[in-house]
Image: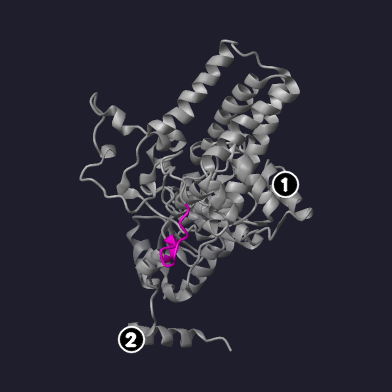
Amino acid sequence: MSPTLTGTVMANAAFEEDPTRYEEVDVKHANIIATGLNKKQLRVVNGLGSFMGSKEMVDLSLKTPKLHISEQPWTFSNWYKHLNWLNIILVIVIPLIGWMVYFTNAVPLKRETFYFAIFYYGIGGLSITAGYHRLWSHRSYSAIWPLRLFFAFFGAASVEGSIKWWGHSHRIHHRYTDTKRDPYDARRGLFYSHMGWMILKPNPKYKARADISDLNDDWIVRFQHRHYIPIMVLSAFIVPSLVCGHFFDDYLGGFIYAGIIRVFMIQQATFCINSMAHYIGTQPFDDKRTPRDNWLTALVTFGEGYHNFHHEFPTDYRNAIKWYQYDPTKVFIYLSSIIGLSSNLKKFPQNAIEQGLIQQIEKKINSQKRNLNWGPRLTDLPVWNYSEFQRQIEKNERKLTIIGGVVHDVTDFINEHPGGEPLIKEALGKDATRVFSGGVYSHSNAAYNILATLRVAVINEKQNTAVTFARKRGEKYDRTKAN
């Protein structure tokens, strides 16, 4: 049998008498569990701690100097120390070379190579969104080894780091969104969240960790991480060069367009999730943090642009939940489940999703309501008995009438009354509830709202009537508070 309200109150009283009766979760130990430090971690190393990011971001063994370079002002003598030069070469210098080749027409772009580059862009992009992101980082579904192997190989072709590194950084991002520990902290500006976080050295004060023991337990993740450089070079540059060379007699074009420029484009598209998806768009589920839903970002990222939904429901295999929203990654995962390549597709309960939508709508409405004059609450008004009401009438300082158990000052409203001055004068010093409530006019919601701004007191004998009347315009009262 469910406990009664009285029983609950008694239980609370017992807790207050003996607060040690209920054991609290130890915060420090809970954080240890969240980082995976409570269990033995399988060590998987490839020596690329600085690749596509900085080892300082996650390595808790690093000692923090008294004043890190990121805390020092930029000067002519130290500007180069602020930069992560490996990443600058990878994401800026090499792409610039590729674009120079294109704009100078040093290597003409063949139509066949262009079409293959788009095709290969799609394979690499889906391997990041369906593989790196939704499968490994969020475990939103399960996949058998051939599909995981496909994601690992072609995900490396996007040159965004290994699954282990990518997944770790992304889990930190979700754990510490919009804080100094967030690797792509959107509060630091659009450029920083887009790619500044990679080309600038992060402050090791804010390094963080997340539990990736499940990633280390996957032999494909371990193999790819240990051999990332050769796999990346093979998948990103050698394969497209060989394919274009063999089929289109365009080895160099394959290297430049299906390799270098394709990598640049897919990297920039992915970076848009960290930047544009935190700046442009709507927040239909929650606005406490920066993630936003943006269909434009979704177009270039295979559906990842519905970022507000994703941050609220991160283990859902979908990013877009409306039929008309663009999310090919969701479709790919679903189709793969039909042919047995994936399973256990996770979806948040629809009730929880609807709750988030309603709560955000309610939050926006309440914010708008606070900017309007709704009149004083009944509980904030003085309570008059009949003699006090008569005394106020006799003073003849204000024009008063009673409607719904509440005294209203209509002094400044007499000339504005839509029904005419004589009608409202007839109600002065009297109870006009019946007249107001359909006896003469069945007043509109606007009339109830205007009337509420004219409140001055509650009639003692009619407090229950006042509460009932106020509820007609949506006010909420506990009757006991009106006594």
- Residue that numbered label 2 is attached to: 18
**For the residue labelled by badge 1, is the local secondary structure a helix, a strand or a loop?**
helix
Please, is residue 122 above or below residue 207 in the view? above
CB atoms of marks 1 and 2 within 8 Å = no
Q: Residue at x 45, y 39 (%)?
A: 51
> Residue 290's mark?
none
Q: Position of residue 205 (x, y in %)?
A: 30, 49
Identify residue type, mark 1: Val
Report the residue at 23% width, 45% height from top. 65
Say whether residue 40 is magenta.
Answer: yes
Residue at screen point 36% across, 35% down: 200
* The quarter of the displayed image where residue 138 is located: bottom right
**Residue 111 location, x and y as percent?**
72, 19
The residue segment tinted magenta is: 33-44
Name the residue carrying label 1.
Answer: 331
Looking at the picture, the colour scheme in use is one colour
Secondary structure under the numbered disc 2 in the rendered image: loop
